[in-house]
Amino acid sequence: MKILLIYFSGTGNTKRVTDLYKTAFEANSAEVDVAEIPLDTQPPNADDYDMIGLGYPIHGFNAPKLLLDVCKKLPKRNVKTDGYKKAFIFKSSGEPVRMSDASSLKMRKILKRRGYAVNNEYQYVMPYNIIFRHTDAEVYKMWTTAQKLVPADVAEILQDKPRLPKKPFLGGFVAWILRCEYWGAHIIGKTFKAKKDCVKCGKCVKLCPMGNIHTNKKGKIKFGGKCMICMRCVQACPKAAINMGIMNSWKVTGAYSFDQPTQPPAPTKHDKYCKKAYDRYYADAQKRIDDYDPNNHKM
């Protein structure tokens, strides 16, 4: 079986999950190719694969527009003669609220029109890169859960056991409203500025997936009007020198450690944030992990 994984990752969370998928499929003798967006070269031809998987971080209860644009360019299939090609979706988010289940609705419609049937969809809680910083203990719990959960989810996909989230009440409408983030991010991104602490290393310029950051003739960092608020520049800045303008109070700087912390977590003001949603996510994840039989799904 040949599988193509297409993904976008802002600060690396979705990339980590994509790597888990690749490893899990290859452990089942599948041949896996990975394409990261934005694509540096011509994308692989989806017609050459038995199945495609699409991964993304949830942005305002939607998939990033970059990935939607790629979906629109997938080879269109003749469903009457060839049938639908199998597809699945995996996504990462800082909180497992029900409304996140609406994030794929637009993408699924696009894929169906192109001749791809999404039968499985999975969400993985990964650390926030905006709003507030998760504790090291919570990040470790998120990551170890994903490491155990992805093989179980891959087993479902290989066994043709469908799993799709229920559409939240008014989910499609709310997601449609919040697509204003696509153009709103362009406006907000213009308020980003490099502070005096900036050492002009150029890391933000190199890493920006939109080519939105550049240096002017005086060597100063400037932000344009194509930002998608992926937070890659902010989290990667070695001096935490990027001011996010009107969103600066939500800034999360510096990369996370996914290792097991050596000290017990100290109480924070965010301990009760979406607690019921997190508890539900971990309980459901543990059930799927417990039900998973690694010896009962080989291809």
Image (cartoon, rainbow, N blue to C red):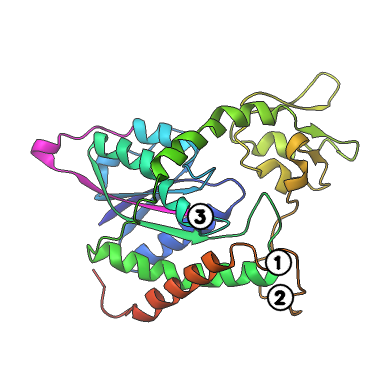
Residue of label 1: 135
Secondary structure state at the residue bearing disc 3: strand
What span is in magenta?
73-92
Residue at 51% in and 55% down: 92
Looking at the picture, how far across and down is residue 167, in whole percent?
Answer: 35, 51
Residue at image x 27%, y 47%? 49
Q: Quadrant of residue 48?
A: top left
| Circle 2 crowding by C-alpha within 10 Å: few under 14, some 14–19, many from 20 | some
Residue found at the very far top of the displayed protein: 217
Q: Can residue 40 be seen in this snapshot?
A: no
Q: Residues within 10 Å of mark 3 (few under 14, many from 20)?
A: many
Residue situated in front as seen by the camera: 166 or 255: 166
x and y percent of residue 34 in the render?
42, 49
Q: Which residue is mark 3?
A: 92
- Can see residue 166? yes
State the residue in front, 159 or 2.
Answer: 159
Q: Amino acid at mark 3?
A: Ser
Please give the residue where the numbered disc 2 appears in the rendered image. Answer: 261
Q: CA distance from mark 3 to mark 1?
A: 17 Å
In this rendering, is residue 16 above or below 80? below
Q: Residue at x 58, y 56 (%)?
A: 94
Amino acid found under the numbered disc labelled 2: Pro
Task: Provide the secondary structure element on which disc 1 rests.
Answer: loop
196 sits left or right of 263 in the view = right
